[in-house]
Image (spheres, helix red, strand yellow):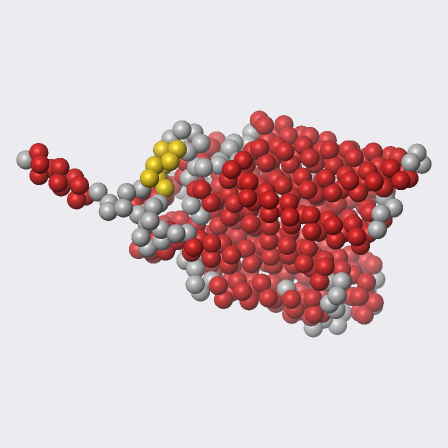
Amino acid sequence: MADVEKIQQEIQQPLIKPKEISSSDGRNQDKNDGGHPWMVYLSTFVAVCGSYEFGACAGYSSPTQSAITAELGLSTAEFSLFGSILTFGAMIGAITSGPIADFIGRKWAMRVYSAFCVGGWLSIYFSEGSLALDVGRLSGGYGMGAFSYVVPVYIAEIAPVNLRGALTTLNQVMICTGVSVAFIVGIVLPWRALALTGIIPCAVLLSGLFFIPESPRWLAKIGAKKEFVAALQKLRGKDADITHEADEIQNYIEELEQLPKASMFDLFQKRYIRSVTIGVGLMVFQQFGGINGICFYVSNIFEMAGFSPSIGTIIYALLQVVVTTIGATLIDKAGRKPLLLVSAVGLVVGCILTAIAFYLKAHELSEKASAVLAVTGILVYISAFSAGMGAVPWVVMSEIFPINVKGVAGSLATLVNWFGAWAISYTFNFLMEWSSCGTFILYAAINAAAIVFIVMVVPETKGRTLEQIQTDINA
């Protein structure tokens, strides 16, 4: 009888046994063996076309300002509205992105947002006045704001533990790439032709969505068990054993299903307040540290400092892509928290150097030193931001919220992010008129506060499943 029981136990074991690896908190977790994550790579590539579209929208207005205003006879106020209305569309997209993605799924949500972007570019291309320009910009902003939520969430939900950080960081890499390409190509192409190039990433995204699976976690959430297993198997490889991962996801979903449907007010319950504080707090510090004021007006900053605006902008554009890419390769090795800390310290240093430069210029102490310090400070700032604070808050945001509140919580965090983007870009010129040195001292103080917040509040999520992260944070 003992031999029979032993044989029965062996038969019940999976043919491919998963290897055990230790997570960062000392617990064991399974790692799929026998499969290859090529479908994860393909799915990520398709999704980050939405991130590239984000960057293309954000970078469009800078190289086209003089050409559009000259051809259509727009005033400075009219073009300013064209540029800033993008953030209003993005805020609307942020509010609606979570509920839409939860209701129709991640893939269909990306299709909807792509349609808004395509419509926006076509409206800009055929525009003969400010109204069509503004409608197109608003439509593109809506798609951009929605992509800023759904892309990192989709990648986090499909990626295995050991690849999740790096793959999610590609969201920021592609945003930077889209901005940089728009800056550089916009020097050569007419503004209408540049608008048509914005349709290309949408076309790739819409085509690619036919070949990649839906998020397994979303399928599990809506009760589509067969589709859930099929999607997870497709992502992990046909020979991979997904038993443990599927059971862990399914058990976690069943626990969440016992909870009532979450609303925005539910986010402030005790069980969710820590994850909301982390997600929203990181978005606040990411934006109010000054990034959009510096990004939108970097040419003016270089010009005020006595440095070539065109050369400085090209260096700025290329540097952010290179450093963000390096950060993507380090995030699953160094961890989220160390990158955030190094980044925040670099932001403080960059702001202080720039503040000193403008202090010297205002008091006519050393014009040459002022220019060198300003350029150095801005390049240190963008390098530091690209290394951590640009990408990592989106990675952490995609990891910390339980799936039953991910829609409303993600929408809240994304809305806060876009409100901060608008507030900083709107107030930057007023602050610079008040005191250019004081502006950067203020940003340095906010980034110093970010260091304290990261040390005291933000957890390390490297090497842990989403279910483990969310259970610990929201326990």
Please report the residue visible at 82 percent of the width from the left and 47 percent of the height from the top: 302
Give residue 2's position: percent from left, percent from top: 8, 34
Residue 392 in view of the camera: yes
Q: Is residue 1 left or right of residue 358?
A: left
Residue at x 67%, y 39% (from the top left corner): 384
Q: Nearer the viewer, residue 33 or 135?
A: 33
Give left or right: position of 3 versus 283: left
Measured from the top left, where is residue 151 in percent x and y?
Answer: 53, 52
Residue that sits furthest to the left in the current view? 1
State the image coordinates of residue 25 (x, y, percent, origin top left): 43, 29
Q: How many discs appear?
A: 0
Q: Where on the picture, by quarter, is residue 354?
A: top right
Left or right: residue 290 versus residue 234 is right
Quadrant of the frame with the N terminus:
top left
Q: Is residue 218 visible?
A: no
Instruction: Classify 365 as above or below 424.
Output: above
Question: Up-down: is 268 above or below 429?
Answer: above
User: Which residue is nearer to you in this view: 64 or 112?
Assistant: 64
The single residue placed furthest to the right in the displayed view is 364
Q: Quadrant of residue 438?
A: top right
Q: Residue at x 81, y 70 (%)?
A: 71
> Could you tell me which quadrant the C terminus lies in?
top left
Q: Residue at x 88, y 35 (%)?
A: 360
Residue 315's spot in the image, x, y percent? 74, 50
